[in-house]
Amino acid sequence: MATQYKNLINGQTIDTGEWCDVVNPATEEVIGQVPSCGAAELDQAVAAARAAFKTWSKTPIEERRATIQAVAKVIQENHEELYRLLTAEQGKPHEQAKGEIMGAAYMAGSQATLQLDDVINEDSDQRLSRTRRVPVGVVGGIVPWNFPVMMAMQKIAPAMLSGCTIVLKPSPFTPLTTLRLAELIKDVVPAGVVNIITGEDSLGPLITSHPDIDKITFTGSTATGKKIMEGASKDLKRITLELGGNDASIVLPDADPKKVAEQLFWSSFSNAGQICVAAKRIYIHEDIYDELAAALVEYAKTVVVGDGAQQGTGVGPIQNKKQYERVLELIQDAKDNGYNFLIGGDADPSGTGYYVPITIMDNPPEDARIVAEEQFGPVMPLMKFSSEEEVIARANNSEYGLAGAVWTGNPEKGVEIAEQLETGTVWINEYLHLSPFAPFGGHKQSGFGAEYGQEGLKEFTYPQVITVKKDAVVA
Ligand code: NAD
């Protein structure tokens, strides 16, 4: 029988007697079961979070910091067990799974050092005006399947530091590592401060519309983000939405194809391309297009696609069947339209495991589905450009605005282009670097609000201004 993982409510691990299966995408075998929660369990979790909020919000921030650091330590100490489980449920190769687990610990521990200091607005003979940050209350966190642990901690850590309590829902596709983590941290975190419950997608709208949840922090698709906004509008919950992206990478003619090929490759193919900020459209200047395309193909031939638990695998399977079918559909669409493939494109849906071969497409048109839509898979379209003005317009011609990159021997030129891109993050000569101290968030339909940094932390609070009239005569 598959291992059963329990939920965490009010410091206790619980189950509901009804279970959802979790599948390993490399083998299609059921590797675990998690409780199927509905409105009753959600009510219990929210009530626990509400009760805990009374004391946790008044707990000194230094103590809250120390608790987050203790959670980060638990993650580090158990990283081997956690990353192996993460590979089994998510598909990413061990090395990348380890990166996610250790990264989650590092990001949480670093976020714990952020400050929420009061700000003096006025200190005159007449009055003292001060802004303090007040925790919003009970937070509902909803997480996707591509980075289950990183995204969970990205919500749990700042919620805890701000003085909020949280009810977190992992994706039904990848709840196991988060629930194992819940079990590991239950004696470190005061009861009710962190509650983790699982269920089908239908649990999400119950969280979004729950009358005793004050804020939703969501990472996932733009389509779901819109539903969340609608659900949260009933009682004007605060919301942070980290949504999809269709990020453009721009390679200028002064970049050396041999030096950038490998980095560019991994900016698209890490986590089998299932990263919100993966490079999903690569624009290469015509002067170096052929040479860089050839270097990318040569490098791609050295990368093994397979089970992430096998040593040597570079690209794992797609995480779930629905997404696998979507990526195959995009490849088929490219074939139907006669687009040129430099490598890949020949997936075998009859085999076991949701594997898509590394696929690189040669200069498909701008309105091709593989260019216009977020593919979220190991399929990289390369496009040729001839002028800066043209490529900036093409990069910005998207409903998304999450991130992007410029590759150039001239970083100043890179910055000049970055400032014209309509995205929340732009990297010059690197990729996928997120800092716990810098805000991360999207523009346009990639969402709004931020995570990480001072701005991300403030999203769990509201500003309260207290003004004292110094020269008043009232008594
Ligand atoms: P998804 O929107 O399908 O699901 C995300 C979460 O929302 C899951 O926990 C799901 O159960 C829940 N959910 C589903 N329907 C809901 C509803 N009606 N109300 C409330 N919750 C609901 O997304 P996904 O397929 O898990 O993740 C992939 C998407 O996430 C991609 O578009 C990717 O770009 C995006 N993403 C964005 C970021 C970012 O930081 N901007 C990071 C990672 C992933």
Image (cartoon, rainbow, N blue to C red):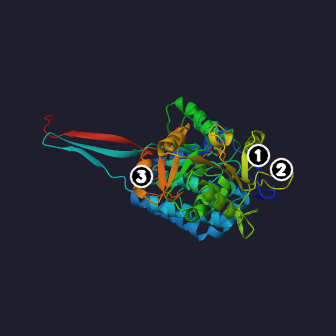
Q: Around disc 3, counting alpha carbons within 10 Å, would you say few (fewer than 14), some (14 to 19), or many (20 or more)?
A: some
Q: CA separation, marks 2 and 3?
A: 43 Å
Give the secondary structure at mark 2: loop
Residue in the picture at 61% in, 58% down: 292
**Residue 349 shows which numbered tag?**
2
Q: Tell me the kind of residue under disc 1.
A: Leu
Q: From the viewer's perspective, is the residue at label 3 or at label 1 nearer?
A: 3
Q: Tell me the kind of residue under disc 3.
A: Val
Q: Are marks 1 and 2 in contact (CB under 8 Å)?
A: yes
Evaluate whether residue 236 shows in this view.
yes
Of the pair 215 and 353, the residue shown nearer to us: 353
Residue 65 falls in image quadrant: bottom left
Q: In the shown orientation, is residue 62 left or right of residue 229?
A: left
Q: CA separation, marks 3 and 1?
A: 36 Å
Q: Residue furthest front?
A: 287
Q: Which residue is mark 1?
A: 328
Pick whichever of labels 2 and 3 is earlier in the sequence.
2
Q: Quadrant of the C terminus?
A: top left
